[in-house]
Amino acid sequence: MLRTLISPSITRPLTSNKVVARAFSTAYIQRQAVTATEDKSYTHILTETKGKVGLITLNRPKALNALCSDLFTEVNQALKTYDSNDNIGAIVITGSKKAFAAGADIKEMKDNTFVDTYKNNFLGHWAEMIEIKKPIIAAVNGYALGGGCELAMMCDIIYAGEKAVFGQPEIKLGVIPGAGGSQRLVKAVGKSKAMEMILTGNVNLNASEALNLGLVSKVVPIDDLVDEAVKTAGVIANMSQPSVQMAKEAINKSFEVPLSAGLRWERIFFQSLFGTADQKEGMNAFAEKRAATFTNK
Ligand SMILES: CCCCCCC[C@H](O)CC(=O)SCCNC(=O)CCNC(=O)[C@H](O)C(C)(C)COP(=O)([O-])OP(=O)([O-])OC[C@H]1O[C@@H](n2cnc3c(N)ncnc32)[C@H](O)[C@@H]1OP(=O)([O-])[O-]
């Protein structure tokens, strides 16, 4: 069943896609229930492997998952561990039902001085996350405010629970977004809405507004959110990993470079994939009317 889903038949309709997808999702969730294992233990996060998916759960419930420095260090460690694990193909980051994350830890940073933050490159280590090659899905329930919204936007796909709230309230604290909000939010929702959110600090987006504006790609019932994100991550994890990672890099290039350079990057990535065994397998499987088995080689 899995092989049916990952076959290049994406270019050719299956006889009954809905039946296959439903059977796949049931089989996949059952398989995950069997294979889920808890990973290394951390102080502020939980990590669990579900099939080929690494699941990171922010776990500071009393502070609504406020992002203290140690928490973010742990997130980066967990991401790097999954990125270097050949058995993992995609990652999901989630929080609690009440809060994905209520922002940077205000109590921790309130006494910082300019000299300290500048000398120690405060927030600089957040950027390590964007070097992760494997796709990351943010599964956002509840508050995603300030650094919480920025963390979600650093991920590659955002799924929202029905009661999710996205906002950038930093202006009310006498500062501005410091981990990408003023840049990524503009690209996600446009200049006018981003200005309104960031300059007032109290215009938040609910899940359906976030969906309509393109900040999130799907809204899911609260209780189903993590399973749904893990399911999508599982589909991605079963594709050929060189293709998946080059696709992620090519899409991210579109935010950085002019169109002509982005198109050149895309073509070179595309051409280079003809050097993989998975390209031969994928295209031969299509021609032979069978499911592909990718080896990530
Ligand atoms: C590595 C460093 C990263 C830095 C990144 C910086 C970049 C970023 O752009 C800057 C920010 O995110 S600036 C931040 C932008 N974000 C904001 O400005 C949002 C601030 N938070 C809020 O406005 C409210 O908590 C909510 C509306 C989220 C919930 O309201 P509610 O349902 O009435 O719940 P409640 O009773 O209010 O909270 C329960 C407990 O959680 C506690 N806690 C919560 N957030 C915290 C935080 N960020 N901090 C610390 N603690 C925080 C709260 O104190 C309380 O603890 P207590 O010991 O029991 O007193």
Image (cartoon, rainbow, N blue to C red):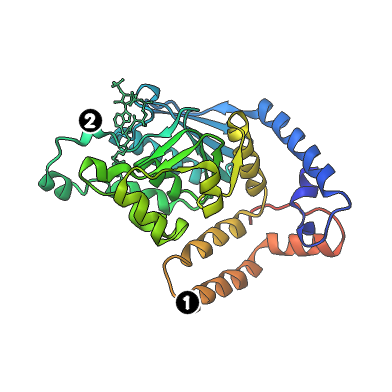
Instruction: Read off the residue under disc 2.
Output: 107
Q: Position of residue 24 (x, y in %)?
A: 77, 40
Task: Say which quarter of the image contains residue 25.
Answer: top right
Please name whichever residue, 9 or 180, is drawn nearer the observer in this view of the structure. 180
Q: Position of residue 130 (x, y in %)?
A: 41, 52
Above or below for 45 versus 185? above
Please name whichever residue, 88 or 90, is drawn nearer the observer in this view of the structure. 90
> Ligand 1: does it lie within 8 Å of the C-beta at label 2?
yes
- Give the label on residue 134, or none: none
- Rendered-image quarter of ligand 1: top left
Amino acid type of the residue tagged 1 in the rendering: Ala
Q: Position of residue 120 (x, y in %)?
A: 18, 46
Amino acid type of the residue tagged 2 in the rendering: Lys
The image quadrant where one finds the C terminus is bottom right
Residue found at the far bottom of this picture: 260
Task: Say which quarter of the image contains residue 227.
Answer: top right
Label 2: few (<14), some (14–19) or many (≥20) C-alpha neighbours in 10 Å? few
Above or below for 63 versus 136? above
Residue found at the far top of this picture: 62
- Give the label on residue 261, or none: 1
Above or below for 296 versus 38? below
Residue depicted at x 60% and y 45%: 218
